[in-house]
Image (cartoon, helix red, strand yellow):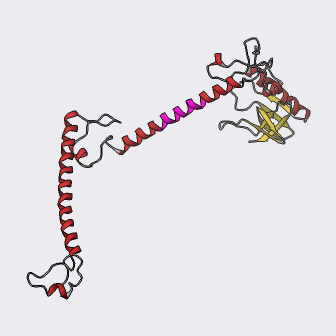
Amino acid sequence: MNCLRCHSPIPAERLAHPGTPPAYCTKACRIAERYERKRGKTLALSKRKLAEAHVLRVETALKEGKSCKGCGKAFSREKLMGTRQTVIYCSRACSEKARAAATRRGQNKLNRKKSRARYEELIKNPPPCASCGEPIDVRPFAGRRPIYCSPECRPSHKPPSRRTELSPRNGLSPGTSGAASELRVAFDLLERGYAVFRSVSPNAPFDLVAVRDEELLRIEVRSGTRNGDHVSCTRKPSDTGDLYAAVCPDNSVEYIKF
């Protein structure tokens, strides 16, 4: 005969006692079995109470009109009954959207802290003026890093760019600059022995025609840029002709095949 709890054989000395046959091998097994039965009843009661409390909580939330914090949509009974946890959002999309917004708020807060730290550092160690070299009081500049200490130190005009300085047609209109480029290319072709013909209409498919013996070239004149030995110019799909004549900022002319 085996024990009802641990299923081990019951000792013969316990079976020899008169009366009802023992169901457990030891007194410890009997006490443990009684405790587990009592504990099981307590757990069942606790689960029932938790379920009743959850139903009451759902009913209260429905009466109060509880809604999603993300989109404001009211929760349904199925949504509230589907989980024992506190429901805040109606869907995963609302939850991720709220999490992203919280991340942005945290990042903005961190950026404000960094800006405040930089501002305090500029107050402690003011930068020098780029014109006179005197320390700049950054407090009137509302956190921006100033370059000049006063309007008097600020230059009245911006320095010319390198592209403007290198351009031989500085200050000319686009039409005048284009005409000057065509004349420069025509001069170069004449030096090479070509007879040059210029287009009368600005809407012609090409700008110049160069003829030498039986050779005829249709040439489109463009402004070019030089990078070492490489010369490039702007191209359009509608361009027709045989060669591009790229006029570089140093007045040199390079010919590029279509």
Q: Residue at x 15, y 79 (%)?
A: 23
Q: Quadrant of the N terminus?
A: bottom left
- Residue occupying the far top of the picture: 152
User: Is 93 contained in the magenta span?
Assistant: no
Residue 72 appears left or right of 223? left
- Residue 61 falls in which quadrant of the image? top left
Q: What residue is rendered at 23% in x and 34% in y?
A: 65
Q: Position of residue 49 (x, y in %)?
A: 18, 50
> Which of the pair 213/61 is nearer the observer?
61
How many tags in the picture? 0
Where on the picture, by quarter, is residue 167? top right
Q: Name the foreground residue: 235 vs 115.
A: 115
Say which residue appears at 61% left-offset and 19% top-offset.
Answer: 142
Q: Main secondary structure of the magenta part?
A: helix
Magenta span: 103-114
Taking depth in this image into account, of 27 and 153 the one nearest to the observer is: 27
Where 200 falls versus 63 (above or below)? Answer: above
Quadrant location of the C terminus? top right
Where residue 235 appears, as percent x and y from the top left, is 70, 37
Tell whether position 110 is magenta.
yes
82 to 127, vertically: above or below: below
Taking 93 as reference, is 169 left or right?
A: right
Q: Position of residue 129 (x, y in %)?
A: 76, 20
Q: In this rendering, would 89 be left or right of 10?
A: right
> Taking 137 as reference, is 38 above or below it?
below
- Relative placement, left or right, of 15 versus 115 is left
